[in-house]
Amino acid sequence: MTDAFFEQLADVGHDPRLCKVHGSVRFDIRDGDRLRQWLLSIDHGQLRVTPGDGPAQAVLKLSTEVAEAMVRGELNGLSAMLRGEILVDGDLALALRMGRLFPSPAAAREVGHPWARR
């Protein structure tokens, strides 16, 4: 589910909610011994998403369970950071802006939302 979310972000190309953002963020998503990484580059709303590691201004470290809950709109990223479920290395302000990419609980409940549980 999380991989599909990032693949869909790659197809979006431009997100107006990030029009004032410039930087790179890497998501390090751990599932037991397996590590899945996604690198997101943002240039004033223009998104470029690639699987794999690389240098980034902010690195978010989280579990698969936390990532999937965020994708489904069941978990707020800021709340998860405050509880220590997401660890951030680097630019915290940039990391906090990533919450705009994930659905809110209200949006996740909308009929037809691709990540809502049915």
Image (cartoon, rainbow, N blue to C red):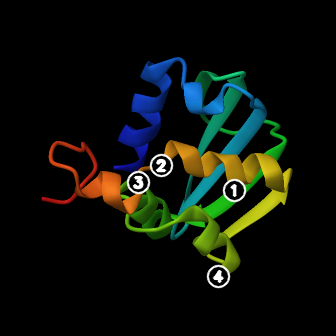
Residue 106 relative to residue 28: left or right:
left
SS under mark 3: helix
Are there few (<14), some (14-19), or many (20+) residues within 10 Å of tag 2?
Answer: many
Q: Amino acid at mark 4?
A: Arg
Mark earlier in primary sequence (1, 3): 1
The residue singled out by tag 3 in the image is: 71
Per the image, the residue denoted by label 4 is 83
Q: Quadrant of the C terminus?
A: bottom left
Front of the two marks 2 and 3 = 2
Q: Secondary structure at mark 1?
A: strand
Residue at screen point 82% across, 56% down:
92
Q: Is residue 23 left or right of residue 98?
A: right
Quickly name the residue at label 2. Answer: 102
Q: Earlier in the sequence, mark 2 or mark 3?
A: 3
Q: Which residue is mark 1?
A: 60
| Residue found at x 70% / y 54% | 96
Amino acid tagged 2: Phe
Q: Gap in Å between the C-alphas at discs 1 and 2?
A: 14 Å
Q: For the residue marked with disc 3, what is the amino acid?
A: Val
Q: Residue at x 63, y 47 (%)?
A: 98
Mark 2 and 3 residues: CB-CB less than 8 Å, in contact?
Answer: yes
Q: Residue 54, image x and y in percent?
A: 76, 36
Give me the C-alpha separation between circle 4 and circle 1.
Answer: 14 Å
Q: Is residue 102 left or right of residue 105?
A: right
Q: Secondary structure at mark 2?
A: loop
Name the spot of residue 103 as percent of width and height, x first.
Answer: 41, 50
The mark that comes first in sequence, 4 or 1, is 1
